[in-house]
Amino acid sequence: MRITLATLLITSFLSIGASAMDTQNNIDTQTITKASDLPEIEGSDENFTGEVAITPLTKVTDGINATSAYVSFNASARSFWHTHPKGQYLVVTEGEGLVQEWGKAAEKIGVGDVIFCPPGIKHWHGANGKTAMTHLALTGSDEDGNNVDWLEPVSDAQYHDANH
Amino acid sequence: MRITLATLLITSFLSIGASAMDTQNNIDTQTITKASDLPEIEGSDENFTGEVAITPLTKVTDGINATSAYVSFNASARSFWHTHPKGQYLVVTEGEGLVQEWGKAAEKIGVGDVIFCPPGIKHWHGANGKTAMTHLALTGSDEDGNNVDWLEPVSDAQYHDANH
């Protein structure tokens, strides 16, 4: 299942997979969502360059103030520049990619690497020009359910420099 | 690197990997912890039956009130019964296993399945008798940094029933 939702990341995945995953609060029983029932959402071209697939995994609950998702970038795909009001962890699960903080050199990341981006720090992440990458993203949500503020695209020149 | 720490899960991994990962708060720059620098900790026999390896990934920060870790269970290995004061998500990343809520039948889980355990619900999770399993655990922490309350072992009889 592939759905295009431009507001997806802005709304912290709150509207996705509701039938299977909207039971985290005010319940008194364990729930299992099978992998085959998880949605896969196409990353919006308002927030990503190239082909990106997002699989939301976990939602904010009464006890956990962050969401998580797998994000898969085809080769050359990457996020726009952005910040996170409550910070974000990335854990690379497949392939190789790049992450860059504004004003600093891009850095290579591979399977098992853990990246922490503090609140308000401008960054982007994605595949490199030759290899696809998937990471888990664990992103803190604020009181209004916001977890990202999107900025401008990573230009071709910026992306070229990051790859060299 | 393998370290035995009986209090590991009780202390929410706060003491592990401090040199590499103790920089999430009060910093203004992105950090990368390479996979090769992550510790792998042997699950204590006070909390687990069989061979279990834990790789802490992310810590509580100013903006994220949960920790995450990969937990790998050899075939037949499993946690003791326990509860989580703030709840827990599991995401299976390798193999096949079992999860059981107290008073209910055990359920099979496989790669990509997402389990949510609400606060205070008694459960256990682990491999089945024939196959190893790894899951990501995303566990809410309370104000004191506690994220689990350990109970009695899963008996051989209970584990046998869960496998059949």
Image: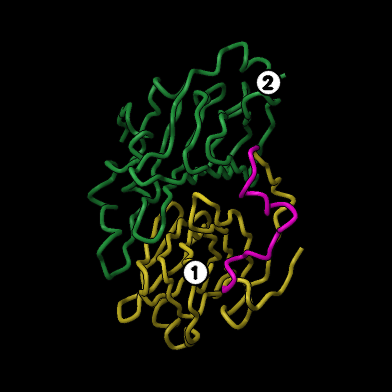
Chain colours: A green, B yellow
Q: Is residue B127 visible?
A: no
Q: Is residue B24 left or right of residue A3?
A: right
Please determine whether, in this image, residue A138 is positioned above or below residue B162: above
Badge 2 marks a residue whose secondary structure is loop
Q: Which of these two is toward me, A117 or B108?
A: A117
Please determine whether, in this image, residue A76 is positioned above or below residue B10: above
Badge 1 marks a residue whose secondary structure is loop
Do dots 1 and 2 share one subunit? no
Report the span colored magenta.
B10-29
Q: Which residue, given by chain and number where applicable, does mark 2 sit on?
A: A163
User: Residue B78 appears at what percent x and percent y?
Assistant: 52, 75
The structure residue drawn at horizontal position 31% and vertical position 29%, both measured from the top left corner, is: A5
Q: Which of these two is toward me, B86 or A110?
A: B86
Subunit that carries the residue with mark 1: B
Q: Is residue B19 magenta?
A: yes
The structure residue drawn at horizontal position 65% and vertical position 78%, both measured from the top left corner, is: B6
- Identify the amino acid type marked 1: Asn
Q: Residue furthest front?
A: B26
Q: Which residue, given by chain and number where applicable, does mark 1 sit on?
A: B147
Quadrant of residue A115 within the rendered picture: top right
Q: Is residue A12 magenta?
A: no
User: Residue B107 appears at what percent x and percent y?
Assistant: 36, 69
- Identify the amino acid type marked 2: Asn
- Which of label 1 and label 2 is nearer to you? 1
- The crowd level at tag 1 (other Cα within 10 Å; few <14, some 14-19, many 20+) is many
Q: Report the magenta stretch's main SS.
A: loop
User: Residue A22 appears at what percent x and percent y?
Assistant: 26, 53
The structure residue drawn at horizontal position 50% and vertical position 32%, both measured from the top left corner, is: A83
Subunit that carries the residue with mark 2: A
Please determine whether, in this image, residue B24 is positioned above or below residue B126: above
